Image (spheres, grey):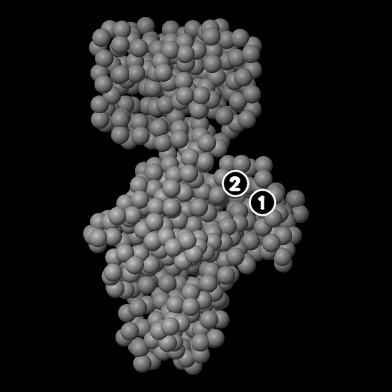
Amino acid sequence: MEENLSKNSSEASEFKKSGIYSKEFLALNITQFLGAFNDNGFKISVSLFLMSRLMSQSNDSFYVALATALFILPFILFSTHCGYFADKYSKRSVIIFAKYLEIAVMVLGLFAFYLENVPFLFICLFLMGAQSTVFGPAKYGILPESVPPQELSRANGYMELATFISIILGTVFGSFVFTYFKSAPYMASLTFVFIAALGAASSHFVARVPVVGVSRQFRINFIADVAGDFKRISGERSILLVIAAITYFWFVAAAVQNNILVYSKEMMKVDESAVGIMLAVLSIGIGIGSGLAGKLSGEMIEFGLVPLGAIIMSAFLFVLQFSYASMPLTCAALFMIGLAGGLFIVPLDSYVQQKAPGGETGRILGLVNFTANSFIVFSSLCIYVWHDLMRLTSANVFTIVSILTIAATAFIIKLLPDFLLRLVFFMLANFVYRIKVSGESRIPFDGAALIVSNHVSLADSFLINAATNRHIRFMLNRHYYDNYNLKTLFKLMKVILIKEPCLSEGEIAAARAAANEGHVIGVYPEFVTNAGENAGEFKIDPVRLSGELNLDIIPVRIEGMKSSYFSPAARESKKLKLPGIFRKVNIVFGPALKAGEVKENFEKLIEFYKTGRYE
């Protein structure tokens, strides 16, 4: 088993990834779009059929709720099983299987509509949910296997954008075709069979990815499977916390969606058409936010967007406490909640896909599906308790969710301070400075390295971190740590403090320990900030440090910070300039120098250090 897994992992590592501008990624997006379109079109058609034909007004909400529950139930029952199959077989093969399964379910739905058989329709909804459960871990799990790591955030952003657009269009289309074929609803269902066939056809153009392998046994008992999965990743605190954050997002999304239905009638006194507009605005917001998150992330997983999204969500959830008198204000708040939700979820999804243990992406995504859908159900229970049992208004419910979001964000930031750090870096890179980065691909995707940078200002460590997806542990002059009111940020960055440029054995040992944990180490050879003509006079020997740590050197040059507010030299010369909006800063990463070859190439290092290029 281990030999097969090793072989599959080797094949996966040698596989050439196609990227987000390839026809394979386009095919995946089309396949996902058509699937989400069909899900929502079929669900709304069933709901409308039940309300228009077979129910009295007193119990229609029960049957609609039952239909929703039957669609969600497979995600809870089968998510871990489907994650297993997504790892055991090629994810492309699982996607193709899921799309042909969708055709079969839609054909059954056609017969159910023709017979006007309610139990049969409910069975079809359950099967549709089961088909989506099969599709989920494979469609998201194939992303890190088919696109390069630096494109993963954008891939997720584009896919989420397409998904939420398809949700809106599918719901509108389902309502339209059911109304058009109201006397013969099976004709409406025929269109869903055709769309499913289109999805199956597009799935054949999805990227061919190798089997990554799976080293565990299949378990029928999904509870034992979930418990085993949590136990297996219990040592991966960051993954556990990110899964918790994703789960909370879907709790909030479901709570907002369910509470809008009550809010619209209780507080706004509007009809169903207005509810549809509000839900569409929310979905559009999530879609645009997801696409924006992908664009802002660039080639990184930008964790700074997570607390930013949470703060915006909390603020506009609170706005709904008093916006009910104005439809435009309410829609604007819902749009911003959706936009913030997109910013929040894309980096988290990308992280789970990227950091899942080798060969277990499907398993982890199956676990995410289980927890997320369990909390979607739990959110309905919370709405019932808050509104019906505690007699709170639906506006008060939005305030509760706002407060919970603030508390959840504070909790996650406390346990994962990198989120707050990335927010600081993101704000610096996008609102204070206009950073142009060259050669960022020279920073290894994982594993240790040694960055050697010129030192112009106290913000250098922040700016270099903002320019890369890696968390860089800088060796920092203790004088700057103690005297410039940046101690809190430096603590969060876990800087390695040094007293003298000669570096003690303890200081080198601290850097070595960080490198052994896989961190990138940063050092300023000049030891002090230096923006003058004599820049490049090394007090810390990078040759010695590279040898002690056995790390390749990646030279970095920062340009544009000499007269910065954060430059001690500028303060002393009184040539100080405030940061300014979009002040241009260039950060250049040079080609790596091998650990054993630094001494021979020392002049090259000096040249790059001064000019940003090798001669």
Residue depicted at x 30% and y 30%: 432
First-in-chain label (1 vs 2): 1
The residue pinned by badge 2 equals 240
Q: In the rendered view, would you say 45 is above or below 368?
A: below
Q: Which amino acid type corresponds to the residue marked 2 in the rendered image?
A: Leu
Name the residue located 31 percent from the left edge and 7 percent from the top edge: 572
**As shown in the figure, which amino acid type bears the numbered disc 1?**
Phe
Q: Is residue 386 visible?
A: yes
Residue 428 is drawn in which quadrant? top left
Q: Nearer the viewer, residue 56 or 312?
A: 56
Mark yes or no: residue 436 visible: no
| Residue neighbourhood size for the residue with mark 1, other residues' Cα within 10 Å, grouped as few (<14), some (14–19), many (≥20) | some
Task: Identify which residue is drawn at 39% across, 61% down.
Answer: 393
When asked about the image quadrant of residue 378, the answer is bottom right
Q: Are marks 1 and 2 in contact (CB under 8 Å)?
A: yes
Along the horizontal axis of the image, is 161 left or right of 546? left
Horizontal relation, residue 224 to residue 206: left or right = right
Q: Position of residue 449 (x, y in %)?
A: 55, 27
- Is 325 situated left or right of 188 in this image? left
Residue sitting at 44 percent across and 77 percent down? 61
Neighbor class of circle 2 (other Cα within 10 Å; few <14, some 14-19, many 20+) is some
| C-alpha separation, residue under disc 1 versus residue under disc 2 | 8 Å
Q: Position of residue 440 (x, y in %)?
A: 43, 33
Disc 2 secondary structure class: helix
Q: What numbered label is drawn on residue 568?
A: none
Q: Any mark on residue 230, and which?
A: 1
